[in-house]
Amino acid sequence: MPDEPTMLSRTFKHFFQSEKAGGVLLMLFTLASLLLANSSFGPAYQSLWRIPVAGLSLEHWVNDGLMAVFFLFIGLELERELFVGELSSFKSALLPMFAAIGGIALPALIHYGLNAGTPTEAGAGIPMATDIAFALAALALLGRRVPAALKIFLTALAVMDDLGAIVVIGLFYTERVALGYLLAALGVFGLLVLLNRVRRVMALLPYLLGGALMWWLMLKSGVHATLAGVMLAFAIPFSAQAEDEHSPSHRLEHRLHQPVAFVILPIFALANTALALGPQWQAGLLTANSLGIIGGLVLGKPLGIGLASLAVVRLGWCRLPPDLGWRHIVGAGMLGGIGFTMSIFVTNLAFAGQAPFIDASKIAVLLASVAAGALGCLWLRMATHE
């Protein structure tokens, strides 16, 4: 008999191990960045990310360029989950789907309620996202104490959460649109889909070259360029066989695991947590914006996820997976409050060009994510047994 009640596929095991290790590395790079920014090397370190390269700063290249690869990886994960993973069955998908909706809506409402009509109103999207790498790394600290079904539920929840964040970015954080460039980008996407669906081209190179062109056109259009990564993921040929390692989508996702976990996200952490803490930085935590972010992630996430899950189960639309109890759902909701990567990414969009708001929001995200992770681990440790 297997040690764990719920069998994990080889793909999911690889994914979980990669995200776990990547989450630990992300923590270390974040700490190193904060220490550097607040040392005697701080001014030089912060200036490093503002160095212009080919018309964009290094920070801009990280956030618009490297993160497009991250979004490509997210899109490939989402495609796999929708077709052969936990989200492929409508009934199985209902619980994490509604849990994600609750975990997106309530944090946004908390922030909006505190900031409506103010210059920080645009930050309502910041506490909506869950950082899958950090959340799984926190869950991994508990080892065999937690059931395998909880790992699967949290992964499916975080993937749906990322989809919600992608939709929010596309709808609410695009200020102006150059229609010609946008139509050209959509045209490239259409050609890539034809290569897949009609011509059945299975080589990756044409898709990657088309994706690069689509990224540039999206960048010029005013729509955030990282969305090109998600679009490219759904244009690449995908196999409906769960363990088919030969489909272009599966091969690319496999190749991107380690670069995303061990290169792209750590560089993102370095570029976006170079925060010099001023003498009055604690006072910034009492602003409506910071309180909305902290309240949204620490309180809104577990309440939204827990209440939405309870509602759909009570309505009879779905059931809790085997081996999971409500104590596990509450713990997953707490870990869902670890925002980090996506929350910081949305911060840069919400307050573009407004450094004081960006820095204060990032500090709030970091503190809230640490609190959510600690509370989630403590809760699950007390609520479960070996």
Image (spheres, helix red, strand yellow):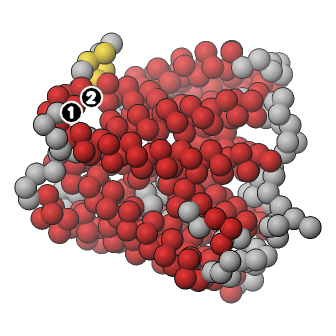
Numbered-mark total: 2
User: x, y percentage for residue 214?
Assistant: 54, 22
Q: Circle 2 — which element?
A: loop
Three-letter residue code for mark 1: Gln
At a point 31% along the width and 15% down the height, the residue shown is 53
Give residue 49's quadrant in the image: top left
Three-letter residue code for mark 2: Trp
Task: Tell me: residue 229, above or below residue 109.
Answer: above
Task: Tell me: residue 302, above or below residue 119.
Answer: below
Q: Give the crowd class for mark 1: few <14, some 14-19, many >=20 residues within 10 Å.
A: many
At a point 76% along the width and 45% down the height, the residue shown is 11
User: Observer-nearest residue: 163 or 5?
Assistant: 5
Q: Give the crowd class for mark 2: few <14, some 14-19, many >=20 residues within 10 Å.
A: some
User: Observer-nearest residue: 267 or 177?
Assistant: 267
Viewer can see residue 263: yes
User: x, y percentage for residue 185?
Assistant: 54, 24
Task: Tell me: residue 84, above or below residue 309.
Answer: above
User: Observer-nearest residue: 113 or 258?
Assistant: 258
Q: Disc 2 and disc 1: Cα gap in Å? A: 6 Å
Q: Which residue, as the protein is rendered here, is positioned at the far right?
A: 1
Quadrant location, the C terminus: bottom right
At a point 66% along the width and 25% down the height, the residue shown is 190
User: x, y percentage for residue 3?
Assistant: 82, 67
> Mark 1 = which residue?
46
Q: Circle 1 — which element?
A: helix
